[in-house]
Amino acid sequence: MTLVAVRNLTRIFDVSKPWLNRVVERRKKAFLTAVSDVSFDVAERSVYALVGESGSGKSTIGKMLVGLLPPSEGAVKIRGTDLARETDAAKVDAVRRDIQMIFQDPFASLNPRWRVRDIIVEPVASRGGETEGMAERLLEQVGLSARDAGKFPHEFSGGQRQRICIARALASEPKLIVCDEPTSALDVSVQAQVLNLMSDLKDEFGLTYLFISHDLTVVQHMADRIGVLYLGRLVEEAGPDALFDDPKHPYTQMLLSAAPQLDNFGRDVPPPTGEIPDPINPPTGCAFHPRCSIAQPVCSRERPEMRDLRGARVACHLAE
Amino acid sequence: MNEPILSIRDLTVEIPTRHGILSPVKGVSYDIGRGEILGVVGESGAGKSMAGNAVIGLLSPPAHIAEGEIWVGGTRVDHLAGEQMRRLRGKEIGMVFQDPLTSLNPLLRIGDQLTETMLAHLDISRSEAEARAVAALEEVGIPGAAERVGSYPHEFSGGMRQRVVIALALCAEPSLIIADEPTTALDVSVQAQIISLLKKLCRERGTAVMLITHDMGVIAEAADRVAVMYAGQLAELGSVREVLTRPRHPYTDGLMGSTPLASRGKDRLHQIPGAMPRLDALPPGCAFHPRCPHAQDRCAENPGPRIEDGAGGVACWFPMTREAVA
């Protein structure tokens, strides 16, 4: 069952200078395409991961999914409801209730002046729901103690704060949780604890995760389906085994070979060349062609369409 | 190992506070040889950066070196006065920090920053320094170096900026570079470029590198030897291959188990219960014993044995003897 259907999603930001500067300096308006024509489906009770480097648009997609940003074009449909265009407020509210988000920085996402109890029940309390004993129950579910409900966020370590964020996300009994780099700010051993907790909760509550990360090993560990983003475009989508054993897009191949590996002592491979291009003036055709080792003239002319290839979807003219 | 460039012996850093004296680094000893990369790995608060700062004399008061010796290229540096230390810093020891933007002066062209550094430390003319600045930028792989010397730091991307910082650290030809999380702020593909650059420079110039990071993958690929730190103490020291495939300290073992690995598939990750103790609440005995699966009475009573030889060892009463796991 498809829970989330993302169709031709595009987000363009206006990054122009103020109008007076434009007139004086004779500049045109500038637009940054953060997400460009991205389509994918997230099945219910699965973990869909978006990976990419900085500027690939993964967080922007996450924000559009939860409704924090309206799409410029295309749509996000959650169980058939398009949050940005649906006019029936009751329907929108019902879907919104099913979506929660966990952010990267657990130090910035908890109000320092609120007690943990108030932070956790807020998603329910703001809708006038019954919250008696809820914070205590949720705290125990995420591996903290019920006594912690009366404390303030500063009394907790980074890993514990992220558990509080998870408890808050669970309070409204959501179906979908968008996790934006949930463990990037944590140490390895704490990351292991949080990832295990997230897996357990997923099974217990039948959750669906959209897991946004730059860390390939974490994604491989967590995801059922992985989408690789480059410069706002989905370049490849596959299951973890297919993606890691048989990457088809040259960018995925580059990313995998660049990722440090624990069993590659003193590896000496030529590192990837070049850097991510300027998203305000992206390359023509395939965005990856200036860095691609197998690029042909067609790559700079035509933007490749997503096509099916051995159990994966890949946007490359030449991948076989 | 040949004569070590850096030799730390029994280093203890203390911070006096109202609630007593804290020791973010306690009895740490290690050596780094010529052309060698020593990875210093540990979680936040393990004292890995503090040890690096002690070497370069950048401890911010009231933190100070309470005990131990630091030798750089045969000179003892831990008790040097401000002016002497300043000469040494940059000349003998180069430093690369995590955030390249904060370690460059935003108001100076990068060419000027490089020439300034060289004129301060080397006995050369300005024109020669300018020529060397271009050569240094070329060496770290900045395209169009001759034109880019006139650019300001903000005109570079993150990866390019980190290359400039490395050029800056190397331009006075130091014998030791301390790289504190040099790739943490960078993307994977850029990280691979920077690591490969560090390895190349280290090999070609024989510079010793202290690579401080929390990322085991970076250590595995870049370092020759690794020092694992926990709660200010050295838990294990040895060759990367030995330590990572046959960890002898239970903490190293737990750390390796916590790291998601391709070969492990989707099984549950191994968890180390609890969290690293705060410096003001260190448990008696071995600092790791409350979280250790193999702890016995002796561990709670006696602090673990210290690694005194700078070459290798394990600070555990009951080191693991398991066969290779990887």
Image (tube, coloured by chain):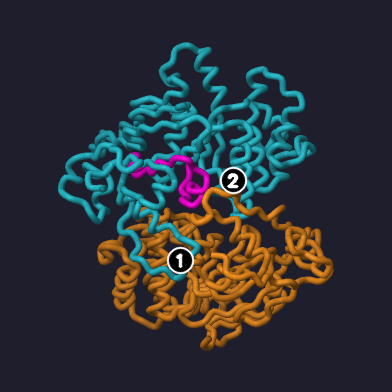
Residue A28 in the image, given as x and y percentages of width and height: 25, 35
Q: Which residue is mark 1?
A: A264
> In percent of the image, x 26 and y 47: which residue is there?
A319
Q: Colour of chain A?
A: cyan
Estimate how packed mark 1 is, as few (under 14), some (14 to 19) or many (20 or more) residues with alpha carbons within 10 Å.
some
Residue B210 in the image, given as x and y percentages of width and height: 52, 72
> In percent of the image, x 34 and y 31: which residue is there?
A10
Would you say residue A235 sits in the magenta stretch?
yes
Residue B161 in the image, given as x and y percentages of width and height: 39, 59
Estimate how packed mark 2 is, as few (under 14), some (14 to 19) or many (20 or more) residues with alpha carbons within 10 Å.
many
- Which amino acid type is marked by label 2? Leu
**Magenta span:** A212-236
Against A255, residue A2 (above or below) is above
Q: Which chain is orange?
A: B
Q: Tell me the SS state at disc 1.
A: loop
Q: Which residue is mark 2?
A: A195
Q: Are marks 1 and 2 in contact (CB under 8 Å)?
A: no
Per the model, the C-alpha gap separating discs 1 and 2 is 24 Å
Please report, as a chain letter, where disc 2 is located: A
Would you say residue A60 sits in the magenta stretch?
no
Decide which of B77, B180 is in the foreground and name it: B180
> In percent of the image, x 72 and y 23: which residue is there?
A131
